[in-house]
Image: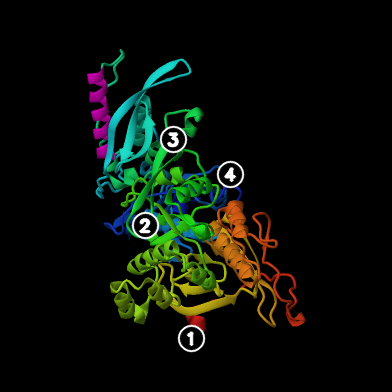
Amino acid sequence: MASEDESLASGPRVVTITKSETGFGFNVRGQVTEGGQLKSINGELYAPMQHVSAVLAGGAAEKAGIRKGDRILNVNNINVEGATHKKVVDLIKSGGPELILMIVSVPRQQAEHLDPSDESSGSCSYYDYTEKRALPISLPDYKHVDRHNEKFIVYNIYLAGRQLCSHRYSEFVQLHNALKREFPDFQFPKLPGKWPFALSDQQLDARRRGLENYLDRVTAVRVIAENDIMQQFLSSDATDTEEQAADVDIRISLPGQSTVTLTIKRTASTSEVLEQLLEKLQLHSDMLCYVALYENMEDQNFDRKLHQNEQPHSIYVQNYTALSSTCLVLKKWLFSAQRESNLLSNEQALEMFYVQAVADVASHKVKPKDKSTELQQLHDSDDKLKYLKTLSDCYGYREVIFPHCGCDARKEGHVIATISYSCFELQACSDDGLLDSQVHTFSWSEIQSWDTDPEYISFSFTYSKPGKRQRTVQIFTSYYTYMFECFERVTAEQELDRSPFDRPDRLAMCRNDSNVVLRTNGVGLNGDRKKPDLPPRPSSVASPEPEENEIEFPTQQQQQQ
């Protein structure tokens, strides 16, 4: 009878993993760059592949037959041979509750060598240390702390002039040991030596310079700088919970190139920070409901609106590897053309919306197409009002276009979701975002309800088209909360536009209620989200129980048939 190693190593095999309460139950590790030299695995040549570095005992992956050391050749019918770690992880996350992997298993002895234990130095490199990116990280000073009858020194860590955190020497030692376990084949620089006696000011400053040199050299290696261990270190703090209420500085980018610095409480929520920012900017009361804080996702050219309960400072320091001075942005939060037109009589609103529009065109978030020449002339003449009116019907203006993601109605490839005042649109595309010709458009009168499922990292909506049964579509995106807020916002604006009463005090109350999400007539934050009251629907399209089969994007083969 063949041994377990012999049977598993016979060639590639397909495994289906169904997500459980503990997730898929395995970790993936591998290279951070594409391509690489072909290597022999079980007698066959393969490009470098991501491998399973850990399997949860009793978890979904173990039950499906996954084991430590398995190389991943294919994810949900997409070849990932030679792919980056990020691409493989993104494909796994975006595929929904069922994951189909094609794997190549290796003998147990070889699998153990791929991923050394904490006690082993290992000789097999599974990380690429060649990609470098110098970060402007510094430890300009230190401070003496006296808390709970204990006295100690903390070193303040800054990046590009913004303070990230403060840490004791012992925490640098813990970081160093954790990184050595995670990257056993990397030659780490030495930490400044430990001294059993109290240090003089000169010795403390020498230690500060040594720690600064250590962080500078280690964070210059991109794979280490972006590792969870380092990110946790640079976003946490040596201080205890009493210090969480301490004042900290953050920078927030305004439309255009300018930034403003705010001194806030470390644990301040989005709504609290926004309130403080608007007060500092002395923004006119007419605009208070139409701006929000966003996180700039540089790698996707996308801005994610922060939820009211998030802590902007935490997001600010976690993005310490971002190239810009801050990842936080103040932007317009508005879909209605009618409301924007009314606001443009206000000079502050006109200036802010115009500067943001120019920046969005430059970054290709808004695509003017054949209006580029006309817009450039209007920009040169500083005709702000006409510029905005000309841009009003261009792709991406007063719309939110989400990065491509998985969808249960799409058997092959991804979709790009676009939310506007008039409709919700799903554009078919390939797994890497290349647009297809297939588009499904849903008017807001057809959409019945919407909700999120954090367990599956997804957003779903139920719709009913005339003469057809009610159906539900699930979209697998890490931006599911923002997508949900956009649905809430559009329907709320639509109802207010239909209302004969539009008092500024009513909008101010909406702003305080949910970080400028306008909530009216049943649009709330708990449970299944149902739309505001609309005109009665024809009896011919009464909504029965939802079907399992959703909208369909035909495959290329089906289209040819």
Q: Is residue 314 left or right of residue 525?
A: left
Residue 18 showing in the rendered view: no
Q: Is residue 276 above or below residue 508?
A: above
Q: Amino acid at mark 3?
A: Asp
Task: Name the residue at 37% across, 49% down.
Answer: 260
Q: SS for tag 4?
A: loop
Residue 298, disc: 2
Q: Position of residue 231 (x, y in %)?
A: 39, 41
The mark closer to the camera, 1 or 3, is 3
Q: Mark 2: few, some, or many residues within 10 Å (few <14, many ≥20)?
A: few
From the image, state whether disc 2 or disc 4 is nearer to you: 2
| Magenta stretch bounds | 201-218
Residue in the picture at 29% in, 20% down: 194
Q: Which amino acid does the dot numbered 4 rest on?
A: Gly
Towards the viewer: 492 or 30: 492
**Residue under the image location 28 percent in, 73 percent down:** 380
| SS under mark 2 | helix
Q: How many marks?
A: 4
Q: Which residue is mark 1?
A: 560
Which disc is residue 247 wearing?
A: 3
Label 3 crowd (10 A; few <14 / some 14-19 / many >=20): some
Q: Label 3, label 4: how many angstroms apart (C-alpha)?
A: 45 Å
Looking at the image, residue 509 sits to the left or right of residue 13; the answer is: right
- Is 315 a magenta residue? no
What is the distance, in whole Å, between disc 1 and disc 3 at their CAs?
A: 63 Å
